[in-house]
Amino acid sequence: MTKTILITGATSGFGAAAVERFLADDWRVVATGRRAERLQALVDKHGAERLHVAAFDIRDADAMQAALDAIPEDFRDIDVLVNNAGLALGTAVAQQASLEQWRQMIDTNVTALATLTHKLLPALIERRGAIINISSIAGVYPYAGGNVYGGTKAFVSQFSLGLRSDLHGTGVRVTTIEPGMAETEFTLVRTSGNQVASDTLYAGANPMTADDIASVIHYVATLPAHLNINRLEIMPVSQSVAGFQVHRGG
């Protein structure tokens, strides 16, 4: 039986790669994102038989509901929700950070994720489906400039564990995937399009790719129904956890 997956943030990075991975495995895919032209490019490439796209800003709850209401009948039985949409903005330490950027990260990474999950829970329970939330190692290991971004990802991981507890007995699986360094548009977004900063960060590091994470998402989604991975932390071999900071004097 063909299964259906809804993937947010599907216009780049992990989300775009996941769309390709699941279509290649003959799933039906509902792909959402802000950039309509990129979603249309997916339809132009794959057709609309197994792909439905919806362009909206995930922070807009009314637009989200309208998009869900407009999902065609063949795509309505959602088996897996991948909450991938999210972003980091700015690299400044907290005392120099933009409050507007903080709020945008919270609205996207926390509020929107919780809103969409709440809306789809009845269908996921009925289907005995799965929720895969994309968090980050930044939600576990702090670093200078990570402040609110790390806080939002810590929420995603803890929220996932709470969902797992609440959904006990329903058959719904809940997994958090917590990636480390992966070369996507992440740093371009974070630095307002600074290609030099992005190239410098990843140069010589042999980071993970979007395809790597898409394969992990696919692995989790296709596990036997009696298995649940609570959280999966994944880094490139080149990356490891650093030591504590120590300030001396003054």
Image (cartoon, rainbow, N blue to C red):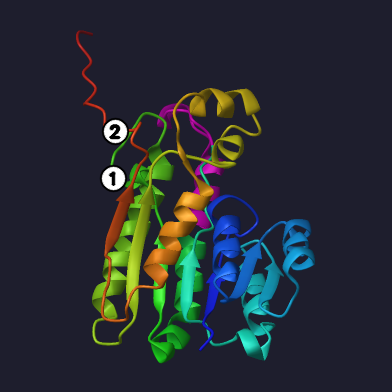
Q: Is residue 74 magenta?
A: no
Q: Nearer the viewer, residue 181 or 85?
A: 181
As drawn, is 1 to the left or to the right of 44? Answer: left
Picture coordinates of residue 124 (x, y %)?
A: 43, 83
Q: Nearer the viewer, residue 223 or 71?
A: 223
Secondary element at tag 1: loop
Q: Is residue 106 magenta?
A: yes
Q: Amino acid at mark 1?
A: Val
Which of the two discs, 2 and 1, labels the residue nearer the N terminus? 1
Q: Is residue 199 above or below residue 25?
A: above
Q: Nearer the viewer, mark 2 or mark 1?
A: 2
- Residue at image mark 1: 140
- Residue at image mark 2: 240
As drawn, is 184 to the left or to the right of 121? Answer: right
* Span highlighted in magenta in the image: 90-109
Q: Is residue 12 above or below residue 228?
A: above
Prevalent SS, magenta region = helix
Q: Nearer the viewer, residue 91 or 223?
A: 223
**Which disc, if any, is residue 57?**
none
